[in-house]
Image (cartoon, rainbow, N blue to C red):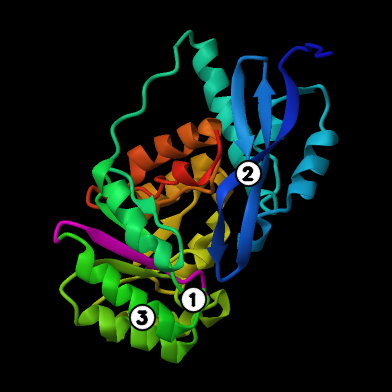
Amino acid sequence: MLKTVSNGYPFDFRCYRRRFLQPLVTSHGIWHTREGIIISLGGCAWGEIAPISWFGSETLEQALDFCRQLPADITEEMIFSIPDNLPACQFGFESALTEMKSWENKQNSSPLPPAPCPPASLLPSGEAALNQWKKLWKLGYRTFKWKIGVDAISQELKIFDLLTRSLPPAAKLRLDANGGLSYEEAKLWLEICDNIPTNIEFLEQPLPVSQFSEMLELSAAFQTAIALDESVATLQQLQHCYQQGWRGIFVIKPGIAGSPSRLRQFCQKHQIDAVFSSVFETEIGRKAALQLAAELSQPNRAVGFGINHFLEG
């Protein structure tokens, strides 16, 4: 039973589980099920907590523990006091608060502004990408993301050659290594990408987070752009990499980045080259994330939210 006190919002939460229609294979391992938390404020405003602990956020259990210790009514002060080690919670609660403010101001939820570009679509790893892109192309996708660093590099390069030969000239391709390459493997990928006609938009997180200086070196040595992802999973990491001199592309996952208001301030202040990307959230988290993306994306960067074909309804 929800209770109301002055200056507070009635709070409730529920967990969810969504099965991947096809397992998501990355260098981190195989992901079968997406779990998260839906929160409500006042019974009319919603937010989503969708952690990815292996990517840099809190664990689902830590997020649940935080929700369980909250009172039945929570204040704005409580929401803006959520610690930085709970970035997915920061995002979920601030998103719900923003929606709550819209209700209080008697404003209906406004439709999302159009994205700067059609979203990028995630391809399955391995040979399955060779057929999947054709189906997605017919649905209107023009930017594709393909996971590498999953199989032997010799096998992946063979598939890559077939993929790049078959993609139409108007297509863009993003390669995402999830930090799974060695320095020499990253150099090899970049050398090949520099010498093919296909539009390789960028190589995403080629090396582990600990090898930031090496990624700076590679970024300066090759024409193909490098984007940071795991290295900038949270706002604190994003700020650190910027302070350390990164001026390349930043892949931002709003659902685990932390406080939306502080993220907005940072992006607007520094005018970074940002690509906004999904954490396989539900429509609740997706709406809040896309609102930030619509405000802060570069006009030539497709948002990375073409992932619905991976999840059951």
User: At which x and y percent is residue 204?
Assistant: 41, 68
Answer with mark 1 or mark 2, whichever residue precedes in sequence. 2
Amino acid type at circle 1 is Gly
Res 66 → quadrant: top right
Frontmost residue, 247 versus 311? 311
| Badge number at residue 19 | 2
Residue in the image at 62% along x and 62% along y: 30
- Could one spot residue 272 in this view of the protein? no
Q: Which residue is mark 3?
A: 157
Up-down relation of residue 174 to residue 196 (above or below): above
Instruction: Give the farthest residue toward the top.
Output: 106
User: At which x and y percent is residue 308?
Assistant: 46, 41
Taking the magenta stretch, the answer to whether it contains residue 213 is no
Start-end of magenta stretch: 169-179
Answer with mark 1 or mark 3, whichever residue precedes in sequence. 1
Label 2 crowd bin: few (<14), some (14–19), many (20+), radius 10 Å? some
Q: Which residue is mark 1?
A: 149
